Amino acid sequence: MAEPCDYDGCLIEFVATVAEVRSRGENGGDVILGEVGTPTLATFDAESFRRLPTLRPGSSVRVRGVAQIHVLDDGAIAGIVAPMLRQVTVLPRSAADIEVLSMPSWWTPRRLAALLAGVGAILAGALVWVGLLRREIHSQSRMLGREMRLRRDAAIEYEASLRERNRLAANLHDTLLQTLGGIDYQLGACRAAAPAAGAGGGHLDVAGRMVEHAMRELRGSVWALRTVPLAGHSLSESLESLAAQSALGRSERIAIAVDGTPFHVPNFVAGNLLLVAQEAIRNALQHASCRVVDVTVRFDAAAAAIEVEVQDDGRGFDPEREPGPDRGHFGLQGMRERVERLGGTLAIASVPGSGTRVWTRVPIREYDSDLDDAPTAEDAVRCDERC
């Protein structure tokens, strides 16, 4: 039907790979085919081009149509038996003359490279995140361990200090207080005999009043040393008992208020807060010349924390100029140390002439119930030796 190698004007059918689909607007379009040895175009009119199936570069197709062979200039190839093809144009009759055999794989080298690059970036980010997470966990673990050690030390030191305070109170009561009572009795006897002697009565009266004052102060100190959270009572109830004892025989009024829904407070936390409140109340009564001392307990269940605030309407002071431990005053320093061992915060706000406010906030931890029972006799002995 044709000369050898001459298919010009013949109906041909072949399999090729789509290299590109190019539109010519209203004039139709071309499908450029590759992998057949010579550039090949399948040319469609506008209607047939619109009806073509979905073609993507790399699709394998079977094409039928009339071939138009374009060869190089005859003069340039004189003497060559087989002409050299420049281009082959195929004229399909309709869109049905191009049949899709297979679609190209979605995994192109570019997409695979992009995927590998994305996976590499994700792995690198994951490694960085894991490293940062490990550092954060290590930091949080160290902080938690330090806080647990501090709170455990606070529990042990609280138990040890209670025993030491009770022992000291008993010794003061049995020795110094009894001695002062004996001196007061002897001074009374001397005052009874002074008129007969005719001299020294005024000095004996002054000495008697000084001894009575010392006995009152010593009884107050003994009571303060023995003040502890009452067994089976809550912190607010213990504060009410403390307020009643502190105001006994005094003109100042001490008011206790509770804010929030009360919850269980471990004994060592409640005890330390009670000692801080006791020191603040004692300072207000002895040094502030106040009329009212307001004590407020706030239970913050949402944040698992408890606050104790002691505020008076006294004369106030300048906290920056208040004597510290270097001058023999350990009250404020002791309060701060107690609260810091519990991981809490203590603030003192005072202005001369405007009263004083002592505020402390202590967090409540889930492991406090274990620490409450953790201190043993050996722990307390070691704590005593350390203190």
Image (tube, rainbow, N blue to C red):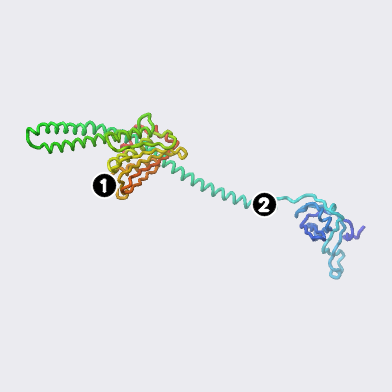
Q: Are marks 2 and 1 in contact (CB under 8 Å)?
A: no
User: On the rendered image, what quadrant is the C terminus found in?
Assistant: top left
In the picture as drawn, the residue positioned furthest to the bottom comes out as: 75
Residue count near mark 1 (Cα–Cα under 10 Å), binned few <14, some 14–19, many ≥20:
few
Res 164 seen here: no
First-in-chain label (2 vs 1) = 2
Res 30 seen here: yes
Q: Position of residue 374 (x, y in %)?
A: 39, 33
Q: Quadrant of residue 178?
A: top left
In the picture as drawn, the residue positioned furthest to the right comes out as: 1
Residue count near mark 2 (Cα–Cα under 10 Å), binned few <14, some 14–19, many ≥20:
few
User: On the rendered image, what quadrant is the N terminus found in?
Assistant: bottom right
Asked whether 215 or 22 is in front, the reply is 215
Amino acid beneath label 1: Arg
In the picture provided, is 256 more to the left or to the right than 219? Answer: right
Q: Position of residue 208 (x, y in %)?
A: 16, 35
Q: Position of residue 171 (x, y in %)?
A: 24, 32
Q: CA distance from mark 2 to mark 1?
A: 77 Å
Amino acid beneath label 2: Leu
Secondary structure state at the residue bearing disc 2: helix
In the picture provided, is 69 more to the left or to the right than 221? Answer: right
- Which residue in the structure is indicated by mark 1? 327
Which of discs 2 and 1 lies nearer the camera? The answer is: 1
Secondary structure state at the residue bearing disc 1: helix
In the picture as drawn, the residue positioned furthest to the left comes out as: 197
Q: Quadrant of residue 71?
A: bottom right
- For the point 26% across and 47% down, the residue is 327
Asked whether 317 or 3 is in front, the reply is 317
Q: Which mark is residue 112?
A: 2
